[in-house]
Amino acid sequence: LAGFGSLMQDVLWCFSQVKGTIDIGVTEADIISTVEFNHTGELLATGDKGGRVVIFQREQESKNQPHRRGEYNVYSTFQSHEPEFDYLKSLEIEEKINKIRWLPQQNAAYFLLSTNDKTVKLWKVSERDKRPEGYNLKDEEGRLRDPSMITMLRVPVLRPMDLMVEATPRRVFANAHTYHINSISVNSDYETYMSADDLRINLWNFEITNQSFNIVDIKPANMEELTEVITAAEFHPHHCNTFVYSSSKGTIRLCDMRTAALCDRHAKFFEEPEDPSNRSFFSEIISSISDVKFSHSGRYIMTRDYLTVKVWDLNMENRPIETYQVHDYLRSKLCSLYENDCIFDKFECVWNGSDSVIMTGSYNNFFRMFDRNTRRDVTLEASRENSKPRAILKPRKVCVGGKRRKDEISVDSLDFSKKILHTAWHPSENIIAVAATNNLYIFQDKVN
Amino acid sequence: MAAPIGTGSRAEETGQEKQDVQEKESLSPERAEEAKLKAKYPNLGQKPGGSDFLMKRLQKGQKYFDSGDYNMAKAKMKNKQLPSAGPEKNLVTGEHIPTPQDLPQRKSSLVASKLAG
């Protein structure tokens, strides 16, 4: 595929589509909370704070319009989760979709997992393009016929109808998490998956909803001794016995489910030594890992903390092999970022299909890409101003100090309410989906 | 690190370098920000009983309103006002009883996503 895995200097990113409305005030329910391509990239799912899932499908590329790479159009939308209230604990359970994960396709239907803070659901999305006609006992509108008026017997036939896409909840995995679910991950065996909350990780079988196995439990006997929480977890892409989880202290543990039923003891422990002279009140907060992702190859893991993205080799636990600065200029703004809670924002990170480029979001609707081979990086912006069809995105630059150039933006002018927390990269092509609050941007690399 | 063999002036330079480095460290952006924060909130980080951040995180979303407690507290206070919620409305602390005013507005009814429009 042209452009697949190419070095960044060869890739020009262009605007393709934007979904969502331009509202002066953003309705909280419309804030996108997760974005995920399926394994072929044919489907793109979003979840939002209002508990709704919208699935886009890539249209077939047409020979008549070769310059239009397949666009994504709405395929299905449904209400996945609804607000709930736990009366026993006086606890409000948000309907916000924290994560969506697709299952690999095994038949004509599509399956995905979606989760809020407490409940994971397996949704089946299937197409119906035929319906039976010619019933004996009811007419075409469904009204019952008078049996005494029926003189003939006929066999109903299936006739084509307008395509209908239905989403049905096939499994509901509830009541297994005391704390808030932050991650779900489908195992490479396609039979099991895990769900992780702040203190525990559970293993489920897709067929069984009334039981799950607890595989990690870091809850201390005395809650006052609590020093860290689980922030993200993921299965290895090929080894069904291996998974990793990250912590609020900036560490990653790799666990092997073959060694014990309860994986409280890690097989590997990844931590970068800290320079004690640099320690400050903010150190632990900004070292908290907000996302962890295996590379497609399974050889590396990538972690995101507040200011950096790090790549770790599974064979080296004592430090990352690569560290990329996302927005180091924020280091001198930590006080105000703490006061406005931005320091607790949880950014995600993604690999491209060939693991050669990594991407993560920042503020002011900026997002960053790092080419691991050339060590070059670029800052791009998701904005309606750059949204003419196939318009090439111009690299953006934040001016740190001194004289600001004409098209640079100063740190103090950054809009911290415009945060790009969620992005997704097509599994094999240079197509990315970027969630900017309540809008979804799709960018593609330039064709020809 | 052993002092280099040489003249006294060389050892002096090393000492001066160390001092320079220390000054730079005290001006590191993170430390400067920490000083700013501590100046604004002198009591920060001094509460006992485990990490505040983690507790706040685990309690996310907890709205604690018990009508029985509320009415009993009102009866106790008689004509006085109940203590109102501090800025951390979601945390249950001290004698503060959540009041109906502290609870969030009713969420709007479920509608379709605008992304699908």
Image (cartoon, coloured by chain):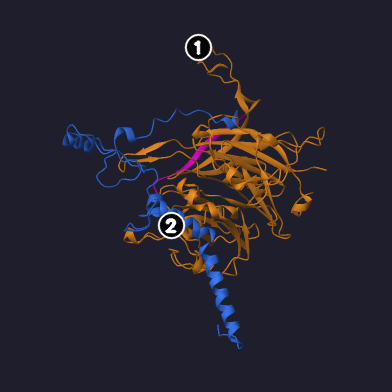
Chain colours: A orange, B blue
Q: Residues within 10 Å of mark 1 (few under 14, many from 20)?
A: few
Image side of residue A93 versus residue A308, left or right: left
The amino acid type found where label 2 is placed reads: Val
Disc 1 chain ID: A
What secondary structure prevails in the magenta region? strand
Q: Quadrant of residue A366?
A: top right
**First to last magenta residue range:** A164-178
Q: Residues within 10 Å of mark 2 (few under 14, many from 20)?
A: many
**A177 magenta-colored:** yes
Which x, y percent locates residue A30?
Answer: 53, 34
Q: Give the residue pinned by disc 1.
A: A148
Q: Give the residue pinned by disc 2.
A: A229
Q: Looking at the picture, does residue A205 appear above or below residue A81?
A: below
Quarter of the C terminus of chain A within the rendering: top right
Disc 2 chain ID: A
**A222 magenta-colored:** no
The amino acid type found where label 1 is placed reads: Ser
Front position in the image: A100 or A291: A291
SS class, disc 2: loop
SS class, disc 1: helix
Q: Quadrant of residue A136?
A: top right
On the same chain, marks 2 and 1? The answer is yes
Image side of residue A336 versus residue A423, left or right: left
Q: Residue at x 52, y 49 (%)?
A: A346
